[in-house]
Image (cartoon, rainbow, N blue to C red):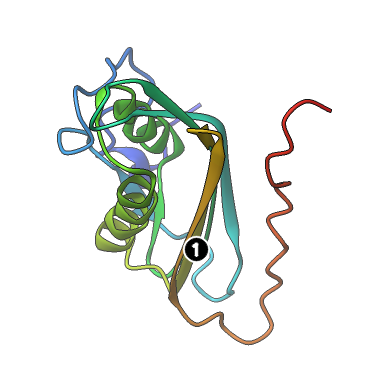
Amino acid sequence: MTTPSIYNNLTQLGSNTALPESPEQAVLESVPNPELEVDYLVRFTAPEFTSLCPLTGQPDFAHLVIDYIPDQRLVESKSLKLYLGSFRNHGAFHEACTVGIGRRLIAELAPKWLRIGGYWYPRGGMPIDVFFQYGEVPKGVWVPEQKVDGYRGRG
């Protein structure tokens, strides 16, 4: 099978790539949108997202849902996975992580629309949910609910 030329510039896909030391060092790669004539939604779900509390260094856990409507570029999923994984050693509050991920994707992709829901598990006995949105949904695009239940504890 020959590799289409739109993938020639990718540096992480198809190779053993180490987890970046930090989100700033992570490389987010993209490819041209092959469906420019149609508006559609792309969803990434990261149910085991981890970062560190910037004050205590203790781990924080979240279920992230990233929805975007691409314009010219699509994020390459392995690079997104590595970028999200780089937060494991990164100290930041929930709001900074969630909004920062959204802003980085906007800077790299210039999507028509993007939203990210960060459903954080309890810290100090209280879960924190953080939501960030950019742009307006183009007419006619189906945007499903994120449907992540709020934290209920056991059972």
Where 17 falls versus 67 (above or below)?
Answer: above
Which one is in front, 107 or 119?
119
Under tag 1, what secondary structure? strand
Q: Quadrant of the C terminus?
A: top right
Q: Locate residue 27 relative to residue 77 in the image: left or right.
A: left
Quarter of the view holding residue 63: top right
Going 35% across and 47% down the picture, which residue do you hit? 6
Which residue occupies 63% across, 87% down?
139
**Residue lying at the far bottom of the rendered structure:** 139
Where residue 88 appears, as percent x and y from the top left, is 33, 23
Near mark 1 (Cα within 10 A), the count class, few <14, some 14-19 or many ≥20, is some
Give the left or right position of residue 133, taking residue 138 as reference. Answer: left
Residue 98 % position (x, y): 39, 50
Residue 118 visible? The answer is no
| Residue found at the far front of this picture | 124
Q: Horizontal and vertical percent for residue 103? A: 30, 59
Return the x and y of residue 22 as percentages of the image width and height: 20, 29
Report the front residue among 105 and 47: 47
Q: Picture quarter containing residue 51?
A: top left
Q: Which residue is mark 1?
A: 115
| Residue found at x 42% / y 31% | 81
Q: In the figure, 84 relative to 37: above or below?
A: above
